[in-house]
Image: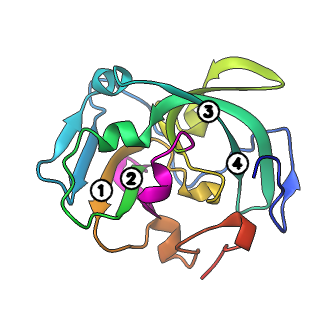
Amino acid sequence: MGNKLPPGQFETENWPILHQGDVYEFSEDTWNFRLFGEVKEEVSLSYSDVMKLPKTVSTIDMHCVTTWSKFGTTFEGIALRELVNLAELNEGAKYVKIYGYYNGDPFGYSANMPLEPLLGDDALFVYRWKDQNHEWEEITPKHGYPLRLIPPASFYLWKGTKWASGIRFMKEDEAGFWEELGYSMTANPFKEERYR
């Protein structure tokens, strides 16, 4: 699927910045990451807890619903599966909602996805990146620092929650922030699943 342009998209070498609400200002003292919902016991992680987890480096294509696609960006981060491994899931937990800060609320933004496609090397909570024009650098606050989900290329990028704050495990799929406003629940760029 690498370098395959989905329908209705154009290729860019830039990484455009689009977001709703305020840019979150990271404070390590108050930041934490929660694993909750359909779990035997809720898990709360500090920034240092998260950064001690095994790291993955992966090149992931990004497709934004606003019609740009960026190929060949390499990210370093924590694979979503590493966080899943810290929680004992209840039977039937097949969906997740990835939460992030929105106007000061740690759980004000969310995006829903099925869990299974997120268990590979291409679903990362990233903190640094590089491409053909940039050496390794931290993601900026506007791109979601300190942690931002980059989803697999089989999802539009709005599923990539910025300023990530937690994962809620669910048995049933449930609309997130943009989905409640009429965006697709499944968001596959190759099927042009932009809106419901």
**Of pointers 1 and 3, the one earlier in the residue sequence:** 3
What residue is disc 3 on? 58
Q: Secondary structure at mark 1?
A: strand
Circle 2 crowding by C-alpha within 10 Å: few under 14, some 14–19, many from 20 = many
Residue 12, placed above or below residue 98: above
Q: Label 3 to label 4, Cα distance in Å?
A: 12 Å
Res 68 → quadrant: bottom right
Task: Measuring from the top left, give residue 123's x and y in whole percent.
Answer: 52, 44
Q: Secondary structure at mark 2?
A: strand
Question: Which numbered disc covers residue 99?
Answer: 2
Q: Label 2 to label 4, Cα distance in Å?
A: 19 Å
Q: Is residue 23 visible?
A: no
User: How many dots with numbers?
Assistant: 4
Q: Residue at x 24, y 38 (%)?
A: 86
What's the coloring here?
Answer: rainbow
Question: Which numbered disc covers residue 134?
Answer: none
Residue contact at pointers 1 and 2, CB within 8 angstroms? yes
Res 164 → quadrant: top left
